[in-house]
């Protein structure tokens, strides 16, 4: 697919959102709640700026997508965000609680969009992965961990560690570390996952809460191994920070644009 075609598709997708938001359209601007980082920089350069040039409608990027804040906005009928970048699990919860507008796909040319991207209440915009990242200073060459079982092996791979302070993803990697095959993960054996976490808990230096933390922890040498988002680690690799991440045991996720 050519770059121009990609931009045309993205512009048509963006237009579909903003045609559904008459207030934003009349104001000649819309407010977008995203996750920041390298993804946001790419969205601004490749999507928001071309969209503004084509339509005159300015995109305002604001704080990360807080589910409770979206819920409060909808319930008080004071919605400040026109488009929100929700993780898949957040979107399904929002649908269940009646917080989202349905999508109108008649406004979009869908011939170049994969079927999985088109949910009745959201348009998927990207895949991302939760990965095992580590310091190449601590583990040079090919000596780094190759799986979550290795992450749990504190004798073979000593060092400070960080994990996500959230059950999403954390339970999966705890079960993978405990030997559960990938095709047998679901439904999750939560009790087994917490028993696995009990073993690694004494070796966790930081339980992080936001995606910007793991790359900073690795950059500052506060931890040697961690769960992190692939794009965040790729970004600091480009800045020549000596880190690596593995695709093995990565957790693939979708993110969706939704309209509160």
Image (cartoon, helix red, strand yellow):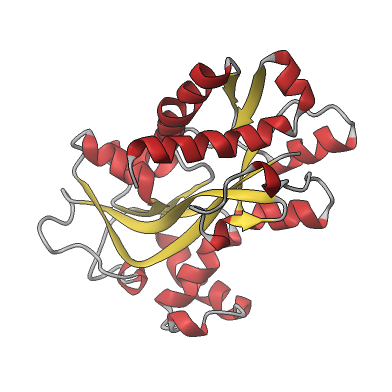
Q: Residue 206, position in %: x, y?
A: 45, 48
Q: Residue 187, position in %: x, y?
A: 62, 80
- Quarter of the image for residue 66 reads top right
Q: Residue 7, position in %: x, y?
A: 43, 35
Residue most toward the left?
A: 141
**Residue in the image at 79% along x and 29% along y:** 79
Q: Which of 165 and 127 is in front in this view?
A: 127
Q: Residue 237, position in %: x, y?
A: 23, 41
Q: Which of 146 and 217 is in front in this view?
A: 146
Total count of labels: 0
Q: Nearer the viewer, residue 171 or 62?
A: 62
Residue 34 visible at all? no
Q: Quadrant of the C terminus?
A: top right
**Residue in the image at 78% along x and 22% along y:** 23
Judged left or right of residue 207, residue 93 is right
Q: Decide: is 143 above or below 9.
A: below
Residue 214 visible at all? yes
Residue most toward the right?
A: 76
Q: Decide: is 68 above or below 45.
A: below
**Residue in the image at 17% along x and 57% along y:** 139
Judged left or right of residue 175, residue 217 is left
Q: Decide: is 159 above or below 147.
A: above
**Residue in the image at 31% along x and 63% along y:** 247
């Amino acid at each position: 697919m050519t770059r121009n075609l990609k931009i045309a598709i993205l512009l048509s997708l963006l237009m579909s959102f903003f045609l559904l938001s008459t207030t934003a359209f009349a104001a000649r601007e819309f407010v977008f709640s995203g996750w920041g980082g390298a993804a946001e920089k790419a969205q601004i350069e490749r999507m928001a700026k071309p969209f503004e040039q084509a339509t005159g409608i300015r995109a305002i990027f604001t704080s990360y997508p807080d589910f409770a804040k979206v819920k409060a906005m909808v319930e008080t009928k004071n919605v400040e965000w026109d488009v929100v970048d929700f993780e898949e699990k957040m979107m399904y919860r929002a649908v269940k609680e009646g917080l989202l507008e349905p999508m109108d796909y008649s406004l979009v040319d869908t011939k170049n969009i994969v079927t999985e991207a088109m949910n009745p209440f959201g348009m998927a915009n990207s895949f991302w992965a939760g990965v095992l990242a580590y310091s190449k200073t601590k583990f040079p060459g090919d000596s780094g961990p190759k799986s979550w079982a290795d992450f749990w092996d504190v004798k073979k791979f000593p060092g400070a560690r960080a994990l996500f302070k959230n059950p999403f993803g954390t339970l999966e990697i705890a079960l993978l570390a405990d030997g559960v095959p990938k095709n047998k993960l679901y439904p999750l054996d939560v009790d087994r996952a917490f028993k696995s976490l009990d073993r690694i808990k004494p070796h966790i230096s930081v339980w992080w809460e936001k995606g910007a933390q793991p790359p900073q922890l690795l950059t500052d040498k506060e931890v040697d191994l961690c769960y992190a988002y692939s794009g965040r680690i790729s970004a600091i690799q480009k800045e020549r920070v000596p880190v690596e991440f593995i695709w093995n045991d990565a957790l693939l996720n979708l993110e969706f644009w939704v309209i509160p």
